[in-house]
Image: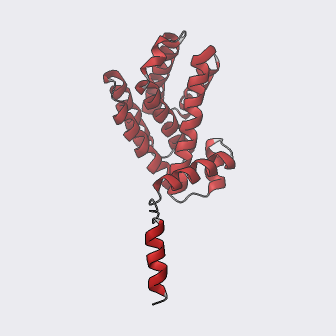
């Protein structure tokens, strides 16, 4: 595993931020991991970025807490993060991978609206992180493959983001256009 110490730091700081409800700090940690993932193409960094970013989105939406199954899911999620931290400290890559998968398994055991919401958060987090990796220069195909999303999902998200970031074009009213046209023929 590349960047073990960085991933360990990210998970430790994310856990501390969860305890105080600081979703902005968690997002920032996810972005730090994403930068490293873009440089190294390390799947472990990518998995950490998605999990931490998803955690930030889950924490900032407090309406989840009222849904059936929330308490159990939250307990499993945070317990799994504790086990991820322990695995990283012990250099146990198998335990790290097993616990990364355990988060996905916990989502599969949810039901109803909570399951749909959490699955949606993870899907969108994967697409968001893929877009960031693509911005850092990874090919669209490789990025989509690393995050388990389709090229269409990535292209759609990246394209809509580029449009949103593009400078806004001002339209000119009819009188001004006529004046400009008349000036061209003078």
Q: Please state, as top left, top right, bottom left or bottom right, where the C terminus lies in the image.
A: bottom left
Q: How many marks?
A: 0
The residue lying toward the viewer, choosing from 117 and 174, is 174
142 shown above or below 56: below
Residue 113 visible in the current orientation: yes
Question: Would residue 20 be found to the left or right of residue 34 on screen?
Answer: left
- Say which quarter of the image contains residue 104: top right
Q: Residue drawn 64% across and 48% down?
A: 144
Residue 33 in percent (x, y) is at 44, 44
The residue lying toward the viewer, choosing from 112 and 18, is 112
Residue 160 in percent (x, y) is at 56, 50
Question: Would residue 3 be found to the left or right of residue 115 on screen?
Answer: left
Q: Residue drawn 52% across and 15% down?
A: 73
Question: Looking at this rendering, what residue extends furthest in the bottom direction?
Answer: 186
The residue lying toward the viewer, choosing from 72 and 184, is 184
Residue 94 in percent (x, y) is at 58, 31
Residue 153 in percent (x, y) is at 65, 45
Q: Residue drawn 65% across and 41% down?
A: 148
Q: What's the colour scheme?
A: secondary structure
100 shown above or below 142: above
Question: Would residue 137 be found to the left or right of residue 62 on screen?
Answer: right
Residue 91 visible in the current orientation: no
Question: Would residue 169 be found to the left or right of residue 69 on screen?
Answer: left
Question: Looking at this rendering, what residue extends furthest in the left direction?
Answer: 20
């Amino acid at each position: 595993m590349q960047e073990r110490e960085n991933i360990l730091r990210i998970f430790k700081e994310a856990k501390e931020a969860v305890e105080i409800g600081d979703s902005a700090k968690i997002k920032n940690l996810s972005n730090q991991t994403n930068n490293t993932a873009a440089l190294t193409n390390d799947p472990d960094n990518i998995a950490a970025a998605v999990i931490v970013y998803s955690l930030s989105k889950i924490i900032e939406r407090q309406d989840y807490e009222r849904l059936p199954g929330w308490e159990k899911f939250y307990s499993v999620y945070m317990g799994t993060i504790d086990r991820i931290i322990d695995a990283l400290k012990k250099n146990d890559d198998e335990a790290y991978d097993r616990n990364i998968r355990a988060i996905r398994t916990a989502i599969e055991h949810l039901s109803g609206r909570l399951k749909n919401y959490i699955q949606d958060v993870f899907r969108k987090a994967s697409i968001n992180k893929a877009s960031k990796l693509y911005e850092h220069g990874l090919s669209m195909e490789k990025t989509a493959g690393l995050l388990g999303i389709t090229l269409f999902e990535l292209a759609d998200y990246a394209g809509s983001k580029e449009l949103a970031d593009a400078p806004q074009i001002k339209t000119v009213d009819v009188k001004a256009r006529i004046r400009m046209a008349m000036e061209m023929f003078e």
